[in-house]
């Protein structure tokens, strides 16, 4: 279940990055962007588990399971309190799973958008 960047995924990720860099997605009133945001674009309701682990000390800093309707988003504001390398693991109950190693910057003006589509699970960096 490796990650393949199809044309559809690229176009979806490009539109998300453009929206985020314009400040349209996930920026809070204080100018900070959430660290992690999930998006379900599969056409069905999914149960999604997200786990974030700091790789330096293997501390689990986020573990959550949510039910996402089609076109729904789940935001995790500031789960990563300091910069450093983190492993983000996302799995769909009974289906896809993928992980991404993110060197989280000290700045809170960036984050990760996780897009779940019929093609799989993709990760995109976003900047406010």
Image (cartoon, rainbow, N blue to C red):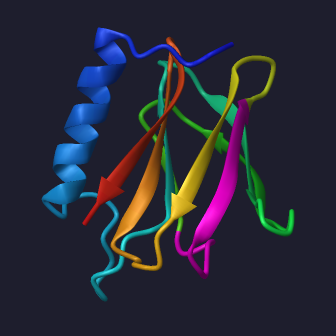
In the displayed orientation, state which residue is furthest to the bottom: 30
- Image label count: 0
Direction from residue 1 to residue 32 in the image, left or right? left
Residue 87 in the image: x percent, y percent? 70, 51
Question: Which one is in front, 76 or 71?
Answer: 76
**Vertical arrangement, residue 86 with respect to residue 16, above or below:** below
Q: Which residues are magenta?
A: 77-91
**Vertical arrangement, residue 119 with respect to residue 64, above or below:** above
Q: Residue sitting at 59 percent across and 81 percent down?
A: 82
Residue 89 in the image: x percent, y percent? 71, 42
Residue 109 in the image: x percent, y percent? 33, 73
In the displayed orientation, state which residue is furthest to the front: 56
Q: Quadrant of the C terminus?
A: bottom left
Say which quarter of the image contains residue 56.
Answer: bottom right
Q: Residue sitting at 55 percent across and 19 percent down?
A: 3
**Vertical arrangement, residue 83 with respect to residue 53, above or below:** below
Q: Is residue 89 magenta?
A: yes
Direction from residue 34 to residue 23 in the image, left or right? left
Q: Quadrant of the N terminus?
A: top right
Question: Which one is in front, 126 or 119?
Answer: 126
Q: Is residue 83 magenta?
A: yes
Q: Residue sitting at 73 percent across and 32 percent down?
A: 91
Q: Residue sitting at 27 percent across and 82 percent down?
A: 31
Residue 19 in the image: x percent, y percent? 19, 49
Question: Which one is in front, 57 or 61?
Answer: 57
Say which quarter of the image contains residue 126.
Answer: bottom left
Direction from residue 28 to residue 95 in the image, left or right? right
Direction from residue 33 to residue 83 in the image, left or right? right
In the displayed orientation, state which residue is furthest to the left: 22
């Amino acid at each position: 279940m490796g990650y393949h960047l199809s044309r559809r995924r690229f176009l979806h990720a490009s539109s998300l990055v453009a929206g985020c860099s314009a400040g349209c997605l996930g920026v809070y009133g204080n100018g900070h962007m959430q660290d992690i945001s999930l998006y379900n674009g599969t056409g069905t309701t999914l149960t999604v588990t997200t786990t974030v682990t700091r790789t330096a000390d293997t501390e689990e800093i986020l573990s959550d399971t949510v039910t996402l309707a089609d076109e729904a988003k789940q935001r995790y504001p500031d789960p990563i309190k300091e910069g450093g390398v983190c492993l983000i693991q996302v799995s769909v109950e009974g289906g896809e799973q993928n992980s991404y190693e993110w060197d989280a910057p000290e700045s809170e003006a960036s984050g990760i958008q996780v897009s779940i589509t019929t093609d799989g699970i993709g990760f995109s960096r976003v900047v406010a």
